[in-house]
Amino acid sequence: MSTTDTFDLYGIDDLLTEDERDIRDAVRAFGVKELRPHVATWFDEAKLPARELARELGGLGVLGMHLEGYGCAGLGAVTYGLACLELEAVDSGLRSLVSVQGSLAMFAIWKYGTEEQKQEWLPRMAAGEAVGCFGLTEADYGSNPGGMRTIAKRDGDDWVLNGSKLWITNGSIADVAVVWARTDERIRGFVVPTDTPGFTANEIKQKLSLRASVTSELVFEDLRLPGSALLPEVAGLRGPLGCLDEARFGIIFGSLGAARDSLATAVDYSISREVFDKPLASYQLTQKKIADMAVELGNGMLLALHLGRLKEKGTISSDQISVGKLNNVRKSLEIARESRTILGANGISLEYSPIRHAANLESVLTYEGTSEVHTLVVGKALTGISAFG
């Protein structure tokens, strides 16, 4: 058994099919060769060649890989989760690029769109030739998306959109945005080409987390859309929340990638680093840290796999996705932080990954539902009493 592979300790490979292992290994190899050599620089400079990476990831087959048809592979939930894990083992920003493209923008069109919308966008998005974003969150309405102020009003056969969205991954590089807006009836979704007059995207700078990711503000000023831009198959918050469940599922696996890489870095460092003339790994306190982290990481992986199998059977619930997101992101952040302590002062350098993973996971803890929101979701599931509002 490798000294740094916690999943070997749990026999995780025995729980996967040969195809799942093969695709996981292919994504891992891509990450090692094409992404890892550059990721510290991307993070340091807060610059990501996102459009170029989208085409490469499309060629790898991971964009919308869990959707069927329209150039998508139609692979299982566990396979998709493993791909997210391997990408986030490099950096959370890279997994975010894939999650937003496939599980938010593409999924919304695939699930709720017309055949014309699907044919127009999904094949190009699966290939990485077109990039998508997902406009839900607003400056004052993150955890409470139902309070959104962005509005869409009918004008003859058209819709006129006004408002703004904030913290939108891929926003300023996107070719298409799925935007959710309040109408005279209910909240509805719209497929918005970003070259439409009245659409503006402003990249958000000076981030201390997810620096290897494009994050933007979207502004809509009298943006006119044809009636065919409406997503016809859903109305109300059920639409965007269904998309968020898809993205949260990827995070359940993905966050463990950041934790696995942090722990592996810490173990390798502890073996090679000498303190008082013997390896740091030989001290009981260091081994306790490593053992505790390995147990939490392995338990998180077992939870992720169980939820993945439930999703493949079609029986997973939103409450169960909240359990997975709450536990795995929280534990992964703890692992990244603890791994940093093993590296001592060297741990604050971008030469080593734990501090970068920890900074990124602070954002992952917040987006797609904060830890507090998921805690209350679980509390409601157990008590039958809602603590919201």
Image (spheres, grey):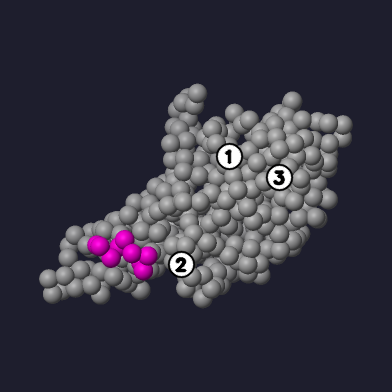
Q: Quadrant of residue 296?
A: bottom left
User: Where in the figure is residue 166, as x and y percent of width and height?
Assistant: 57, 42
Which mark is on residue 137?
Answer: 1
Q: Earlier in the sequence, mark 1 or mark 2?
A: 2
Residue shown at 61%/40% (left/top)? 165
Query: Between residues 324 and 179, which one lies in front from this camera angle?
Result: 179
Looking at the image, residue 363 sits to the left or right of residue 67; the answer is left
Looking at the image, residue 361 sits to the left or right of residue 134; the answer is left
Q: Do residues under tags 1 and 3 come within 8 Å of each other at their CB atoms?
A: no
Q: Which residues are magenta?
A: 344-352
User: Where in the figure is residue 164, as x and y percent of width and height?
Assistant: 63, 38
Amino acid tagged 1? Thr
User: Could you give the CA–CA distance between mark 1 and mark 2, rounded to whole angstroms?
Assistant: 29 Å
Q: Earlier in the sequence, mark 1 or mark 3?
A: 1
Residue shown at 46%/48% (left/top)? 363
User: Could you give the CA–CA distance between mark 3 and mark 2, rounded to whole angstroms?
Assistant: 31 Å
Query: Between residues 229 and 88, which one lies in front from this camera angle?
Result: 229
Amino acid tagged 3? Phe
Q: Which residue is mark 3?
A: 199
Q: Residues within 10 Å of mark 2 (few under 14, many from 20)?
A: some
Q: Secondary structure at mark 3?
A: strand
Which mark is on residue 41?
Answer: 2
Residue shown at 44%/66% (left/top)? 40
162 within the magenta span: no
Q: Residues within 10 Å of mark 3 (few under 14, many from 20)?
A: many
Residue shown at 48%/70% (left/top)? 38
Task: Using the image, determine if residue 74 lies above or below residue 155.
Answer: below
Looking at the image, residue 76 sits to the left or right of residue 110; the answer is left
